Amino acid sequence: MAALLQRCSTLVVIAGVGLGASVACAEPILGRASVIDGDTIEIHGQRIRFNGIDAPESKQLCLDAQGKKYRCGQKASFALAGFLEGRQPTTCIEVDRDRYRRVVAVCTAGGVDIAEWMVKQGHALDWPEYSNGAYASAQEAARGGKRGMWAGSFALPWEWRRHSDAAPLISGAGF
């Protein structure tokens, strides 16, 4: 399900991904994206976090289908970079700012909702606290297909960050 972005003179209406949000109209951010991590890019020096998803952190370890540890956050970053490589420019519509004052946005590349693609490939998760379930069906497709992190075991990125000072946290199949 691709995000349908409609601009009007005073509102940006985000529909089609279940976000049901409207915000003050801002100019889209358009340009060549550089990957910061699996859920953050940079365009023209502006850091942009994808709305409604969370990807594993670069140092986060997951287990593959054979039980071998791998850096799932790094793998997510590489997957995002590969996806964006042939689909420039990237267009982002700001929907919020996070506590670090980064732009939080719905972004597309080549007409594809990037966050949805990352979740469908199993490299990021629907973050219900912020998504209102917008990417739940994409996540179920990844889980059912055992794609990406769903092929093995992992900790939810938001839980991993909470416990990252402790021993590596890896739980069974995420949920």
Image: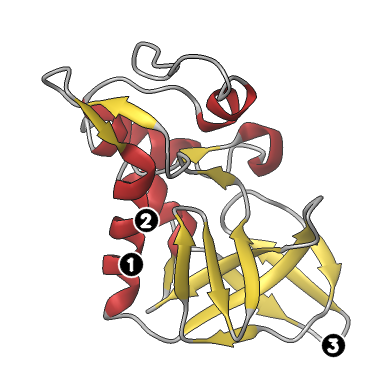
Where residue 81 is drawn, which disc sits there? Answer: 1
Residue 156 drawn at (x, y percent): 49, 26
| Residue drawn at 69 percent across, 41 percent down | 130
Residue pointed to by mark 3: 9
Q: Is residue 164 visible?
A: yes
Where residue 108 is drawn, which disc sits there? Answer: none
Q: How is the image coloured?
A: secondary structure
Q: Would you identify the image quadrant in which residue 51 lies? A: bottom right
Camera-nearest residue between 73 and 168: 168
| Residue drawn at 17 percent across, 17 percent down | 67
Left or right of residue 137: residue 129: right
Q: Are marks 1 and 2 in contact (CB under 8 Å)?
A: yes
| Residue drawn at 59 percent across, 30 percent down | 161
Where residue 77 is drawn, which disc sits there? Answer: 2
N-terminal of the two: label 3 or label 2?
3
Residue 87 drawn at (x, y percent): 33, 80
Q: Look at the numbered disc 1 and give the secondary structure of its residue.
A: helix
Characterize the local packing of mark 3: few (<14), some (14-19) or many (20 or more) Cα atoms within 10 angstroms: few
Q: Is residue 144 visible?
A: no
* Amino acid of disc 1: Ala
Q: Where the C terminus falls, by quadrant? A: top left
Q: Look at the numbered disc 2 and give the secondary structure of its residue.
A: helix
Q: CA distance from mark 3 to mark 2?
A: 35 Å
Left or right of residue 107: residue 77: left
28, above or below 79, in the image = below
* Amino acid of disc 2: Ser
Q: Are marks 3 and 2 in contact (CB under 8 Å)?
A: no
Q: CA distance from mark 1 to mark 2?
A: 6 Å
141, above or below 85, in the image = above
N-terminal of the two: label 3 or label 1?
3
